[in-house]
Amino acid sequence: MDNQAFDGRPNLSDLELIWRCLNCGEHMVVEGETLPEVCPSCSAPKTEFERVRED
Ligand SMILES: [Zn+2]
């Protein structure tokens, strides 16, 4: 077995950001600044969203 190994980097582009709804905890992957107006899960306004950092 000599499969080429992954280099361990996540396959997430710089334009894709993860946001979290503070009201219900729903995670959303958002491209650029195109946040939904309301949470798809609980309909909280986007002012309730918080950016999630992945380190
Ligand atoms: Zn929500």
Image: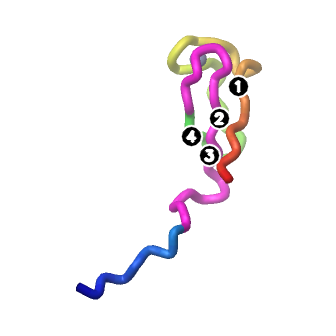
- Element class at badge 2: strand
**Closer to the camera: disc 3 or disc 4?**
4
- Element class at badge 3: strand
Q: Position of residue 4 (x, y in %)?
A: 36, 83
Question: How far is the residue under mark 1 from the one under mark 3?
Answer: 15 Å
Question: How far is the residue under mark 1 from the one under mark 4?
Answer: 12 Å
Disc 3 crowd, CA 10 A, few/some/many (<14, 14-19, 20+): few
Q: Residue at x 51, y 61 (%)?
A: 11
Question: How far is the residue under mark 3 from the one under mark 2?
Answer: 10 Å
For the residue marked with disc 3, what is the amino acid?
Glu
Q: Along the polypeptide, which appears first: circle 2 or circle 1?
A: 2
Disc 4 crowd, CA 10 A, few/some/many (<14, 14-19, 20+): some
Q: Give 24 or 55, whichever is nearer the viewer.
A: 55
Q: Position of residue 33 (x, y in %)?
A: 71, 41
Question: How far is the residue under mark 2 from the one under mark 1?
Answer: 6 Å
For the residue marked with disc 2, what is the amino acid?
Trp
- Residue identified by numbered label 3: 31
Region rendered in magenta: 9-27
Question: How far is the residue under mark 2 from the one under mark 4?
Answer: 6 Å
Q: Residue at x 51, y 17 (%)?
A: 41
- Element class at badge 4: strand
Q: Determine the quadrant in which ligand 1 lies.
A: top right
